[in-house]
């Protein structure tokens, strides 16, 4: 098969790396890819949201399957675009159609969906344009901390936890005044949930599903979980506080009703679904849905797969997932992100990266990197993930931290405390 992966992050490098190991694969393309993906496939300089350009690549390269990594093209309707095209509609695209992508694309839609199907989540209220005064009054009735969410996609920056009423009201106004454009025209105010976060993942073909191992993401930039939110600074899988019994609760109370809801709403969902969860006491609550794999969660979940990922995707495309056997490694996986100094705020790009050709004990997944005249340079906030598998987290993390020293670029920043809380 010829496969096209859409995206350019660490998640896409990981998916590409894993699919490249499949003997079902003929040619692998990544659009646009990054500085690491040419080691497993061919980069094609096309934007994930330029569907006409993607269409042309699919035709030119005789692509048999498209795998969509990030949320934006899904929310923009790439799956629908393919289905409605008389030439492209036989080519499977892994990811939900537009309506399904709303689970991530609109917090308001996701909350209503959870209400309707009895899925545990924080209580909430949505405010549409024009309801500023009502919102200000409503906030006064709540107590701190306040959880404010822009309704639409805001690159992970659309959630603010305000510690006092002033900050909450100020943030609300900024959202309403268009801090994130259309994405923050509707704002959701949510109950604050106190607990431990984890992520659960499902791959579904719309009929059946497979549960992938859960992961824990380290979202804050600073050690000890301080400072602003990022896309994720590290990840671990499995999650020590997700026991068998707790996973069963997630399955019964969250995954099953979500799958039922998708079928009831006649949403044709074929792809990954990511449940951002809070474990409150011994109960799972959903704090968000993502309609794709996580980044950097993919960098710890996918390497734990023993079975063939391309086969899984093919099974999804043809609704044969019930016949697929998901086999996992016994090892634990950890990943640490190397970021550019200043991220998630302003940072410089174009810094020369030097690293050994072969790093034996770790797997390096590129994110914000590119090749410039043969030289690898930084090109984003999160530069790369260093992943290791080992019989326990201590070994995996010490291998990672040991190897990080041999990767150099100006302004290299990483959290030294990944896994310390466990
Ligand atoms: P999200 O983009 O929805 O994942 O939110 C970003 C982060 O905000 C999450 O990872 C949580 O740490 C936090 N968060 C979101 N919703 C809530 C909530 N209702 N209660 C407490 N923390 C939350
Ligand atoms: N690491 C969080 C996400 O992928 O949304």
Image (spheres, rainbow, N blue to C red):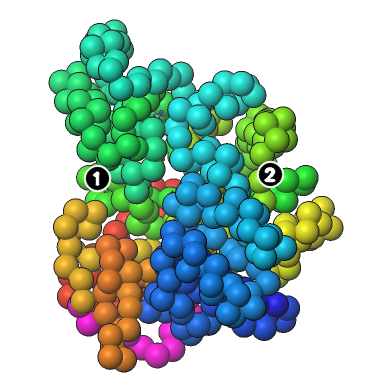
- The residue range painted magenta reads 351-363
Task: Look at mark 1 in the image and give the residue it sits on.
Answer: 228
> Which of the two residues, 303 or 109, is positioned nearer the viewer here?
109
Answer with the quadrant where ligand 1 appears in the image: top left
- Spatial CA span between label 1 and label 2: 36 Å
Q: Residue at x 45, y 35 (%)?
A: 106
Note whether ligand 2 is within 8 Å of mark 2. Answer: no
Describe residue 371's horizontal placement relative to residue 389 as left or right. Answer: left
Q: Residues within 10 Å of mark 1 (few under 14, many from 20)?
A: some
Q: Which of marks 1 and 2 is in front?
A: 2
Residue 189 vertical placement versus 245 (above, below): above
Identify the secondary structure beneath mark 2: loop
Whether residue 151 is visible here, answered yes or no, is yes
> Which of the two residues, 375 or 242, is positioned nearer the viewer here?
375
Task: Look at mark 2 in the image and give the residue it sits on.
Answer: 268
Describe residue 281's horizontal placement relative to residue 312 as left or right. Answer: left
Note whether ligand 1 is within 8 Å of mark 1. Answer: no
Q: Earlier in the sequence, mark 1 or mark 2?
A: 1
Q: Residues within 10 Å of mark 2 (few under 14, many from 20)?
A: some
Residue 167 in picture, x, y percent from top left: 17, 26
Q: Residue at x 46, y 83 (%)?
A: 38
Residue 288 in picture, x, y percent from top left: 48, 37
| The image quarter in which residue 81 lies | bottom right
Residue 386 vertical placement versus 147 (above, below): below
- Residue that lies at the very extreme toward the right in this rendered image: 323
Identify the secondary structure beneath mark 1: strand
| The image quarter in which residue 21 lies | bottom right
Residue 383 in picture, x, y percent from top left: 32, 69
- Tell me, yes or no, whether the highlighted magenta stretch contains residue 23: no
Q: Residue at x 27, y 40 (%)?
A: 180
Residue 394 in picture, x, y percent from top left: 45, 62
Q: Do the residues labelled 1 and 2 touch (CB within 8 Å)?
A: no
């Amino acid at each position: 098969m010829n496969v096209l992966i859409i995206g350019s992050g660490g998640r896409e490098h990981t998916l590409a790396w894993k699919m490249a190991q499949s003997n079902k694969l003929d040619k692998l393309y990544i659009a646009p890819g990054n500085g690491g993906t040419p080691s497993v496939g061919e980069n094609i300089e096309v934007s994930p949201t330029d569907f006409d350009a993607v269409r042309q690549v699919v035709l030119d390269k005789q692509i048999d399957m498209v795998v969509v990594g990030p949320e934006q093209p899904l929310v923009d309707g790439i799956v629908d675009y393919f289905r409605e095209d008389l030439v492209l509609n036989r080519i499977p695209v892994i990811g939900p159609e537009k309506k399904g992508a709303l689970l991530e694309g609109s917090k308001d839609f996701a909350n209503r969906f959870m209400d309707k199907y009895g899925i545990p989540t924080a209580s909430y209220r949505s405010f549409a344009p024009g309801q500023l005064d009502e919102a200000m009054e409503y906030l006064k009735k709540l107590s701190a901390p306040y959880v404010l969410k822009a309704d639409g996609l805001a690159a992970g920056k659309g959630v603010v936890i305000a510690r006092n009423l002033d900050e909450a009201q100020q943030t609300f106004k900024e959202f309403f005044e268009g801090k994130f454009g259309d994405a923050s025209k509707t704002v959701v105010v949510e109950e604050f949930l106190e607990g431990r976060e984890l992520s659960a993942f499902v791959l579904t073909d719309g009929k059946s599903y497979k549960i992938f191992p859960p992961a824990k993401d380290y979202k804050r930039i600073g050690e000890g979980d301080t400072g602003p939110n990022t896309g994720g600074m590290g990840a671990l899988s499995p999650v020590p506080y997700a026991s068998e019994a707790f996973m069963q609760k997630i399955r019964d109370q969250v995954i099953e009703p979500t799958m039922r809801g998708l079928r009831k709403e006649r949403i044709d969902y074929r792809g990954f679904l990511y449940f951002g969860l809070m474990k409150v006491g011994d109960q799972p609550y959903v704090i968000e849905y993502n309609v794709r794999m996580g980044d950097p969660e993919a960098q710890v979940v996918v390497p734990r797969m023993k079975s063939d990922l391309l086969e899984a995707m093919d099974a999804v495309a043809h609704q044969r997932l019930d016949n697929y056997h998901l086999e996992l490694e016994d090892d634990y996986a950890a990943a640490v992100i190397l970021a550019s100094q200043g991220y998630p705020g302003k940072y410089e790009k174009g810094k020369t990266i030097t690293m050994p050709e072969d790093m034996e004990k770790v797997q390096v997944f590129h994110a914000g990197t590119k090749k410039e005249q043969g030289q690898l340079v930084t090109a984003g906030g999160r530069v790369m993930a260093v992943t290791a598998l080992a019989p326990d987290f201590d070994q995996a993390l010490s291998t990672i931290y040991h190897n990080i020293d041999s990767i150099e670029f100006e302004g290299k920043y990483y959290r030294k405390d990944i896994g310390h809380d466990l």
